[in-house]
Image (spheres, helix red, strand yellow):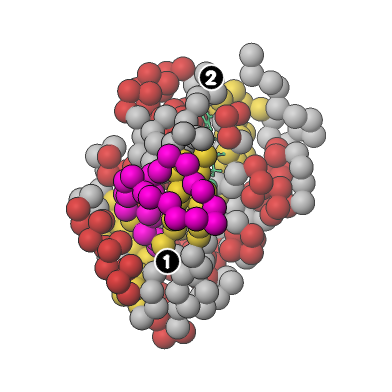
Amino acid sequence: MILTVTLNAALDITHHLDRLRPHGSNRVRAVAERAGGKGVNVARILHALGHPAVVTGLAGGLTGRAIRAELASAGLADRMLSIAGESRRTVAVVEESAGDTTILLEPGPVVGAEEWARFLDHLDALLADATAVVLAGSLPRGVPEDAYARLLGLAHTRGVPAVLDADGAALSTALSAGPALVKPNADELAAATGLSDPVAAARALHAAGAGAVVASLGPDGLIAVTSQGSWRARPPARLAGNPTGAGDAAVAALTLGLATGAPWPGRLAEAVALSAAAVAAPLAGDFDPDVHRALRSRVAVRPFAPFAAEEPHPCP
Ligand SMILES: Nc1ncnc2c1ncn2[C@@H]1O[C@H](COP(=O)(O)OP(=O)(O)OP(=O)(O)O)[C@@H](O)[C@H]1O
Ligand SMILES: [Mg+2]
């Protein structure tokens, strides 16, 4: 099974209304709630593809209970560790007439030192049955800045390949712990390296310790810098829709590729098709299966010279 870790799990609440009027009362037409956070989204996608996934992380309080109830009703295996603090909620207000969305993000709980120590033991036990592990999303307050480096150390000892989707210090402090793959987006890549050229930046993260760097560039697709070669993969067209969670779909496909050892070009084509299919679905953690099927064989994957100074050859 593939294990996904969401340390700052959330209850994602979506309010639908016609138009948001600031400074006044607003009547909401419909409300939807579901468990969120990047690792949860990745597990949801793996589950929909028919691959067993187990969700772990930290959840607490009434919101934590709501998160876990929703995981159960979605059929996702829940091995969250309970903590004392209240899990966070995210609130998205969707204005249907304006086609606009306003998002409020709560900070989430403060995790105690003893809770963090318990989580390390908890994860170590779960890793015994894992074929790959995904570490994804922001760190809650109270856990150490190098939290992902610690978790990568546990995975390494157990021989479980790890995929990391993080940014800022959570990413930079984890590279030397040797994640099998990191999946920054364009902004995260530039922030982590100070380099505006994504190829140069991906090479820098690879040199800093990531086994493979797959950088997602929105509608331009992915570039991969690995020890086996470097590739660029592009979707056949830019899709309209909701790009939030497209990166999580790419992570799900890349993790499956890692677990099965599929050749890189096929892994990248699958990641581009699945993430485009996620853009075509309204909610993060979902994808449109028809778009996924239709795009799989239409993704252009081209190698480029791994250590050349210039840009990769543009795809036609
Ligand atoms: N408009 C689009 N049309 C087609 N494919 C897209 C589009 N936007 C994104 N993608 C696909 O989704 C992948 C991930 O997108 P992006 O780089 O925006 O990820 P992200 O910022 O990490 O997303 P998130 O963190 O919200 O999940 C891209 O590499 C690309 O293959
Ligand atoms: Mg992302």
**Residue nearest the observer in this picture, 64 or 309:** 64
Task: Please state which amino acid type lies under the numbered disc 1.
Answer: Arg
Label annotation for residue 116: none
**The residue at label 1 has a CB less than 8 Å from ligand 1:** no
Q: Which residue is mark 1?
A: 88
Q: Which residue is at a point 21% across and 57% down the rendered structure image?
A: 72
Local SS, label 2: loop
Q: Is residue 316 magenta?
A: no
Drawn side of residue 24 relative to residue 3, left or right: right
Q: Which residues are magenta?
A: 9-33
In the structure shown, which secondary structural element does the residue marked by tag 1 occupy? strand
Q: Nearer the viewer, residue 251 or 256?
A: 251
Q: Residues within 10 Å of mark 1 (few under 14, many from 20)?
A: many
Task: Looking at the image, tell me whether mark 1 or mark 2 is earlier in sequence order.
Answer: 1
Residue 30 is one of the magenta-drawn residues: yes
Residues marked 1 and 2 touching at CB (< 8 Å): no
Measured Cα–Cα span from mark 1 to mark 2: 36 Å
Q: Which mark lies nearer to you, 1 or 2?
A: 1
Image-based side of 234 in relation to 57, left or right: right
Percent x, y of residue 216: 58, 38
Q: Mark 2 = which residue?
A: 237
Residue type at tag 2: Ala
Residue closest to the eye, 28 or 49: 28
| Whole-percent x, y for residue 170 in the image | 59, 63
